[in-house]
Image: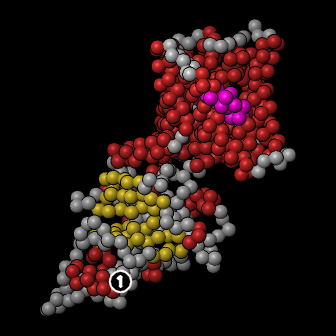
């Protein structure tokens, strides 16, 4: 039977964490001690130094040869079950989509185990819970956060392909991503170039957009949702014969919107970045090169002085050249609102009307528009192996930039050595690690308080979504964990530890991902902030009920 003294021990372990969080919140909202820039510096210190040293200290002090495999298996099975159910829902439900699969998975399965779990469960059930929480934390860092990141990158790749290769995605054989690109679905504007191999396959290069806000004229502005297309000439030479690449760079005009707000507008742009543009947007080549191309291929380009095909002697027109002319259209707003179209020479010659997306005039003869509309419903994707390599490349780039990756792996490596041969860290190294590790827990909570204070609303998602997210976090997650723990034979205190651990508030890393990839960030923000507020009474309630 739980006594008042037991409850007091739990409260006394958690209240110091909330004191650090409250001081941080008040220092920004009430007392104006820190500016947003200073908060960013503090958060940077926590992310780069305090938390990695805390992770390293926890992992290297845990004996990997005495891991509770049943506990880890039950926790892993809970995540697998939730993920499978969400994928089935996504495939069968009318409104099922990857976006909600990612959000619901992170809400229900990824708690704040390190910062909240270790002190809370240690005060409830004793010292034996600390290694269990560290083991769960390690699995989250190495496996489950990597899987979450992979789903975000797959979503970004899917949107990039759908936006820029709606009809030719199945022909893509490889992706090459510029080293400056660290994310496919983030806020950074991307552009793509494509080249055609001899077998007709596309090789795509993804890079950051060359257009920046400094390139925008002060007289430019948004006319509704339509940016201006600027043509960069002359055309770039390609490495395949009889094909000329024309790059049309789409640069948004300056507006009152901030650049970080632009991803929120991408769904309303439609298909304005296509070859179906006005005559003025058709790329022009130099007269000398045009004459050369006309002489070699019998091709007249749109916008040239003459679009007539030379006649042979006797009045018969030569057969149109079937070589492919590729126009590369690059969007500098977002990765999902650009488009590529490919025209053969005969299509260019036969085409006499060009739709203008800016004035809404519909062409009288436009077969490409009809083809695009008919295929829009069936999104193509490159071969699975190509997509897998692309996602693996992008996830690896994110992981190598994350200090927690090195802290987790180095901590595991040292723990394997230390507990195998009974070797301890030198006192100088141990003291250096601990001085930052000891600050890690308090600074992590302080950083959470700064994060909460910088949000415009505590409940940013609205009351309905807040209640739904809290139900998923504190009811569905623990319920699935209870079922998987019973399936692996966990009983007694181990079962109670597993359930309470699943009822911990959400970690901040899923919110960081959702903010970066512009996916339900308001819901994740509410889950982190409001979840921290209600976590203390909810976990104490679980503590009492599970002991009955």
Residue 224 visible from this viewpoint: no
Quarter-of-image position of residue 407? top right
On screen, 344 above or below 471? below
| 330 vs 86, nearest the viewer | 330
For the point 67% across and 29% down, the residue is 435
The furthest residue to the left:
314
For the point 26% across and 66% down, the residue is 240
Range shown magenta: 432-445
On screen, 102 above or below 420? below
Secondary structure mostly seen in magenta is helix
Q: State the image coordinates of residue 247 (x, y, percent, origin top left).
A: 40, 71
Q: Quadrant of the N terminus?
A: top right
**Does the magenta-highlighted stretch encompass residue 16?**
no
Q: Is residue 256 left or right of residue 102?
A: right
Residue on which disc 1 sits: 286
For the point 72% across and 31% down, the residue is 442
Q: State the image coordinates of residue 100 (x, y, percent, origin top left).
A: 56, 43
SS of the residue at dot 1? Answer: loop
For the point 54% across and 52% down, the residue is 186
On screen, 327 above or below 354? above
């Amino acid at each position: 039977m739980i006594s008042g003294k037991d409850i007091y021990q739990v409260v006394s372990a958690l209240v110091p964490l909330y004191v650090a969080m409250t001081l941080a919140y008040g220092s920004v909202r009430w007392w104006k001690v820190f500016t947003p820039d200073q908060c960013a510096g503090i958060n940077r210190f926590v992310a780069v130094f305090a938390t990695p040293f805390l992770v390293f200290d926890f992992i290297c002090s845990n004996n990997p040869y005495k891991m509770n495999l049943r506990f880890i298996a039950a926790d892993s099975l809970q995540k697998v079950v939730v993920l499978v159910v969400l994928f089935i829902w996504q495939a069968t439900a009318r409104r099922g989509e990857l976006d909600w699969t990612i959000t619901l998975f992170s809400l229900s399965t990824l708690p704040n185990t390190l910062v909240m779990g270790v002190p809370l469960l240690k005060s409830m059930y004793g010292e034996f819970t600390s290694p269990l929480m560290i083991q769960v934390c390690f699995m989250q860092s190495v496996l489950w956060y990597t899987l979450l990141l992979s789903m975000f990158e797959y979503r970004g790749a899917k949107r990039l392909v759908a936006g820029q290769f709606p009809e030719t995605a199945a022909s893509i054989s490889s992706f090459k991503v510029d080293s400056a690109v660290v994310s496919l679905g983030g806020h950074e504007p991307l552009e793509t170039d494509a080249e055609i191999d001899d077998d007709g396959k596309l090789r795509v290069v993804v890079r950051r957009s060359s257009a920046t806000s400094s390139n925008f004229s002060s007289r430019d502005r948004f006319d509704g949702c339509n940016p201006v297309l600027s043509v960069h000439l002359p055309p770039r030479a390609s490495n395949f014969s009889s094909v000329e690449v024309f790059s049309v760079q789409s640069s948004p005009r300056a507006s009152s919107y901030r650049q970080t707000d632009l991803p929120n507008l991408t769904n309303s742009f439609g298909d304005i970045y296509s070859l179906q543009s006005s005559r003025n947007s058709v790329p022009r080549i130099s007269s000398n090169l045009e004459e050369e191309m006309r002489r070699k291929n019998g091709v007249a380009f749109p916008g040239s002085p003459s679009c007539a095909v030379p006649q042979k002697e006797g009045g018969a027109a030569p057969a149109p050249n079937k070589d492919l002319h590729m126009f590369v259209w690059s969007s500098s707003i977002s990765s999902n609102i650009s488009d590529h179209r490919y025209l053969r020479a005969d299509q260019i010659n036969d085409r006499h009307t060009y739709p203008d997306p800016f004035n809404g005039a519909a062409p009288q003869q436009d077969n490409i528009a009809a083809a695009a509309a008919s295929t829009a419903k069936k999104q193509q994707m490159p071969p699975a192996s190509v997509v897998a390599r692309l996602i693996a490349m992008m996830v690896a780039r994110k992981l190598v930039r994350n200090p927690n990756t090195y802290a987790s792996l180095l901590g595991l490596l040292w723990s394997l050595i230390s507990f195998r041969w009974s070797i301890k860290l030198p006192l100088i190294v141990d003291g250096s690690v601990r001085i930052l590790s000891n600050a890690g827990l308090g600074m992590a909570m302080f950083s959470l308080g700064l994060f909460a204070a910088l949000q415009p609303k505590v409940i940013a998602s609205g009351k309905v979504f807040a209640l739904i997210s809290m139900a998923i976090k504190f009811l569905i997650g623990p319920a699935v964990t209870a079922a998987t723990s019973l399936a692996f034979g966990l009983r007694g205190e181990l079962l109670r530890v597993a359930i309470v651990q699943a009822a911990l508030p959400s970690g901040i890393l899923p919110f960081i991902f959702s903010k970066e990839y512009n996916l339900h960030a308001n819901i994740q923000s509410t889950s982190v902030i409001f979840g921290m507020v209600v976590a203390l009474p909810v976990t104490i309630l679980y503590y009492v009920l599970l002991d009955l």
